[in-house]
Image: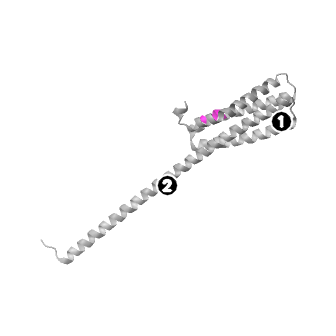
Amino acid sequence: MTLDASLAVVLGVAVGALAGIVGGALAAWRQSKLALEKWSRSREDQHRSDTREAVATVARTLASTAHSMMWATFKVLTSGKASREALASFEVEFHGEVATLVSAQMQLAALDHALYARVTPYIGQVIALGGNTYAALRASMEKDLDAEDRLRSCNQEALDLIRDVPTKVAGLLAPPEAAA
């Protein structure tokens, strides 16, 4: 069986066209796969960046809040007097810091629930200490007998918290099994 020249040309063109179509489809598929991988890496990078930013906000606010408590108690301990203005100022500052902490906590809940679960006890500790600090400052204004001891205790807890923030935050960023 022999092929005539025109049939050979048609078959050659058909094979070439088919090879071009298959090659084009494979190239397009590969390009699409690479684009998807690039997009996926970009999303992962953004997720890591958002998570680091939320943790940084928690760290910054934990330290700032603890410093506010330490400073408010220190001023009363060294001067021997508390004023309504100082108490009101502390209350406003503390409420702002709590809002920032809870906002960062909710960001973490959306980004990484395990990290959220690990940061929540620290935030609870700071909020409780803030309440204790407010009560101690108020007791000092009212000249309660145990006010000075309560102020010293809150001051020391706040100072300890400030010192612990870098270690605690570094522990947050470590894998859960390394932090345990």
Above or below, 34 relative to 5: above
Residue 159's spot in the image, x, y percent? Answer: 72, 31
Total numbered badges shown on the rendered structure: 2
In the picture, the disc for residue 87 is 1
Per the image, is 119 magenta? yes
Q: Is residue 32 above or below residue 6?
A: above
Residue 120 is inside the magenta segment: yes
Of the pair 60 and 105, the residue shown nearer to us: 60
Residue located farthest toward the bottom when viewing the structure as drawn: 6
Kind of residue sitting beneath label 1: Leu
Mark 2 Cα-neighbour bin, 10 Å: few <14, some 14–19, many ≥20? few
Q: How is the image coloured?
A: one colour
Q: Which residues are magenta?
A: 118-122
Question: Residue 12: image x %, image y %?
Answer: 24, 71
In the figure, is residue 97 to the left or right of 80? left
Q: CB of mark 2 within 8 Å of CB of mark 1?
A: no
Quadrant into which the C terminus falls: top right
Instruction: First in sequence, mark 2 or 1: give its number.
Output: 2
| Quarter occupied by residue 158 | top right
- Closer to the camera in the image, 142 or 2: 142
Q: CA distance from mark 2 to mark 1?
A: 51 Å
Give the percent coordinates (x, y) of residue 171: 58, 35
Query: Viewed as shown, does residue 121 lie left or right of 41?
Result: right
Q: Which residue position holds label 2?
A: 39
In the image, 43 versus 72, the foreground residue is 72
The residue lying at 32 percent from left, 67 percent from top is 20
Residue drawn at x 73%, y 40% is 97
- Decide which of 28, 146 is in the foreground and name it: 146
Q: Secondary structure at mark 1?
A: helix
Around disc 1, counting alpha carbons within 10 Å, would you say few (fewer than 14), some (14 to 19), or many (20 or more)?
some
